[in-house]
Amino acid sequence: GESVGLHLPTLSVQEGDNSIINCAYSNSASDYFIWYKQESGKGPQFIIDIRSNMDKRQGQRVTVLLNKTVKHLSLQIAATQPGDSAVYFCAETRPGGGADGLTFGKGTHLIIQP
Amino acid sequence: NAGVMQNPRHLVRRRGQEARLRCSPMKGHSHVYWYRQLPEEGLKFMVYLQKENIIDESGMPKERFSAEFPKEGPSILRIQQVVRGDSAAYFCASSPRRVRNTEAFFGQGTRLTVV
């Protein structure tokens, strides 16, 4: 079936380095993508979104890249800080029928090493 | 403006009991979504409601689960005759419009444990 998935379950980076978290999706009709951050014991927190008519979008210390040709989404976090430790999920929405909510991937656990 | 409020934060039920999970959306939000998260997994969509209407319940189990969003008061996710497999974190999200057009804001979740 269709799904949004992530390449790596755990990513360990040094504090101060840049982090890149990847996500693959299978439905070429998906038109809106969101990255969420979920800290332990908390609900998902919106980080950044991107529509399918865009290739790149930048926020504060974060950049999302969308490659529709290979159906790949990535989240780049600049100068990773201890507070960035969390599980990161990509999510998609699809036009038309089916579930009207978000479809989430399984998540990547970002670990920051001092 | 308070965020999405869910209660209780933790709920323990014995097998066969009923679980009632509450979600108060953000002020001005009339769209509510319920998700379930199993340990070490992503969130799975369950149901999408607007005031007094169920818009999409394609992710809801056919039996024992129901949801409502009355004109007044919070949205309720109700699980009857709970089983161990219902143990999970249940998250509610709200948005002012359909989530396709804007980000949804999530609550802190209710962690249901069935013993």
Image: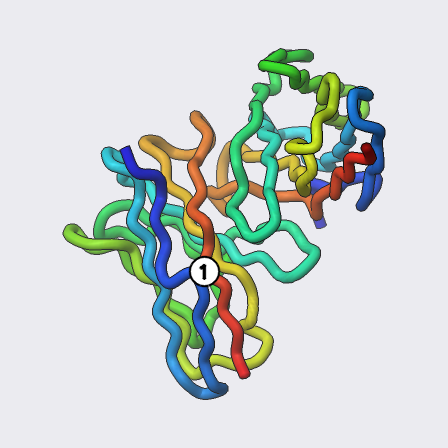
Q: Residue furthest left?
A: B72
Q: Is residue A49 left or right of residue A107?
A: left
Whether residue B7 is visible to the viewer of this picture, yes or no, is yes
Residue at image coords 47%, 80%:
B82
Does residue B34 sit above or below A21 in this rendering?
A: below
Quadrant of res B85:
bottom right
Indicate the position of residue B81 as horizontal and vertical percent values: 43, 83
- Disc 1 target residue: B110
Q: What secondary structure is marked by label 1? A: strand
Residue shown at 59% from the left, 14% from the top: A60
Q: Is residue A89 above or below residue B88?
A: above
Q: Nearer the viewer, residue B79 or A16?
A: A16
Left or right: B104 with respect to A112?
Answer: left
- Quarter holding the C terminus of chain B? bottom right
Q: Position of residue B26 (x, y in %)?
A: 30, 39
Amino acid, disc 1: Thr
Residue in view at x 24 percent, y 34 percent? B28
The residue marked by circle 1 belongs to what chain? B
Q: Where residue B110 appears, x then y in whole percent? A: 45, 60
Image: A76 above or below A103? above
